[in-house]
Amino acid sequence: MLLTEVPHRRLLKLNVHGIVGKILMWIENWLSNRKQRVILNGCFSEWTYVMSEEPQGSVLGQLLFVIVINNIDDWVAGKILKFTDDTKIYRT
């Protein structure tokens, strides 16, 4: 799972992890109404809303990813290796 694959709606359930109030509202605003486009050889695509991504290179994005996958062990059959922004599921 890549961080860019985590939907914003899942990230905004941070209150179950104790993140509430102004901090939760700030994160919600940070993720809301984001747009992106692709530029290739000087050609621009149309702007589109982003529903499952955080800005590349952000520290907060990595933290949110770790919070979201922290309890993945509870609902996945098999063994899991978690490291920074990478998750591997395996079975012997």
Image (cartoon, rainbow, N blue to C red):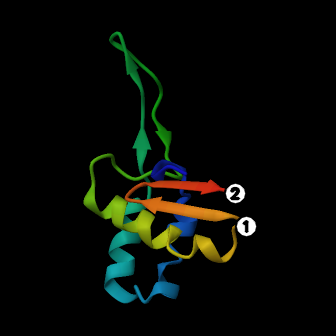
Classify residue 35 by image quadrant: top left
Please, what is the three-letter code of the amino acid marked with disc 1? Ala
Q: Is residue 77 above or below residue 58?
A: below
Q: Which residue is drawn at 65% across and 77% down?
A: 74
- Whether residues under marks 1 and 2 lie with C-beta atoms below 8 angstroms apart, the answer is yes
The residues tagged by marks 1 and 2 sit, at their Cα atoms, a distance apart of: 9 Å
Task: Determine which residue is flagged by label 2.
Answer: 91
Residue 50 on image: x %, y %: 49, 47
Seen from the viewer's position, the closer of residues 54 and 77 is 77
Seen from the viewer's position, the closer of residues 34 and 57 is 57
Q: Which residue is drawn at 30% across and 64% down?
A: 60
Please report whichever mark, 1 or 2, sits nearer to the chain's N-terminal start: 1
Helix, strand or loop at mark 1:
loop
Q: Which residue is drawn at 37% across and 88% down?
A: 21
Query: What is the number of callouts on the image?
Result: 2
Query: Residue 76 vs residue 41: left or right?
Result: right
Seen from the viewer's position, the closer of residues 67 and 34 is 67
Query: Residue 10 vs residue 32: left or right?
Result: right
Point out the residue furthest to the front here: 92
Q: Which residue is drawn at 73% across and 67% down?
A: 77
Seen from the viewer's position, the closer of residues 73 and 37 is 73
Residue 20 on image: x %, y %: 40, 87
Residue 15 on image: x %, y %: 48, 85
Please, what is the three-letter code of the amino acid marked with disc 2? Arg
Residue 19 on image: x %, y %: 40, 85
Helix, strand or loop at mark 2:
loop
Q: Residue 26 carries which label?
A: none
What is the quadrant of the C terminus in the image? bottom right
* Mark 2 neighbour class, 10 Å CA radius: few under 14, some 14 to 19, many 20 or more: few
Task: Determine which residue is flagged by label 1.
Answer: 77
